[in-house]
Amino acid sequence: MLHWGYEEDNGPSRWKEIFPIANGDRQSPIDIQTQQTKYDPALRPLYPNYDPTSAKVILNNGHSTSVEFDDTENKSVLRGGPLTGSYRLRQVHFHWGPSDDLGSEHAVDGTKFAGELHVVHWNADKYSTFVEAARQPDGLAVLAVFLKLGECNSQLKTITDHLDTIKVKGKQRRFTNFDPSCLLPHSLDYWTYLGSLTVPPLLESVIWIVLREPINVCSEQLAKFRNLLCTGEGEAAFCLLKNFRPPQPLRGREVRRN
Ligand SMILES: [Zn+2]
């Protein structure tokens, strides 16, 4: 296995060969069994506060498409929920699948959604860089939003309209004046648990905050994600048809809800 990916020969079932933590005790995603979650009255509401001018570029890294933000200061932060202090916005990216009926990473009572949005933040109160934070148990906070098949999402269009211009792996375009809170659902009620990155190096540093209400996405928008290439300029072209890791064992972890 030369490069990890989502195909038979380099996909999630093979990642443990290079990243043994794939079999660790706090891996993500998980299947959230709603009857087993625990209501915690101490959990606070979420307070996202994002500055649209901190958005910088949209890119295709061959594993997903992401919008990257200027995280040199606390322009855009997430506070509240299960978090202590403020977590600084780093990037937003997406997961999807080969067909409209699956593509999310987390599942709810065994059911998958069409896709999943991840809003990635790091603990700049305690750590000096994203890379340092990504190695600490309280280093990262990822806000996850399910994409549910339905009507086209006008907010998501800002992103899907750009995908044609970054079709090839390695491409990027300037992308600013974008506030990711426009992609959040009406209700910010959530489930939270301690987990990991869902892509190698699978570091166990993520406080997951999974929103219970999904946002809409339509079939045409999902097709635009699938049309991205996992291959670079000059290589034989392969479409990135799926980029989700399946649910991992809970191993005694508690999932709390607000
Ligand atoms: Zn992700």
Image (cartoon, helix red, strand yellow):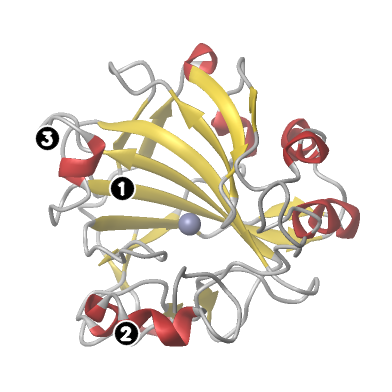
Q: In what element is the residue under mark 3?
A: loop
CA neighbours of label 2 inside 10 A, class few (<14), some (14 to 19), many (20+): few
> Can you say whether 169 is above or below 101 in the image?
above
Residue 168 at x, y percent in the picture: 71, 46
Q: On the image, numbered disc 2 is attached to which residue?
A: 17
Residue 70 at x, y percent in the picture: 40, 20
Q: On the image, numbered disc 3 is attached to which residue?
A: 127
Camera-nearest residue between 247 and 35: 247
Q: Earlier in the sequence, mark 2 or mark 3?
A: 2
Quadrant housing the N terminus? bottom left
Camera-nearest residue between 149 and 165: 165
Q: Of discs 1 and 2, which sits in the foreground?
A: 2
Q: Of discs 3 and 1, which sits in the foreground?
A: 3
Q: Is residue 29 visible?
A: yes
**Mark 1: C-beta under 8 Å from nearest atom of ligand 1:** no
Amino acid type indicated by mark 1:
Ala
Quadrant of residue 184 within the rendered picture: top right
Quadrant housing the C terminus? bottom left
How far separated are the C-alphas under marks 3 and 1?
Answer: 13 Å
Residue 187 marker: none
Amino acid type indicated by mark 2:
Glu
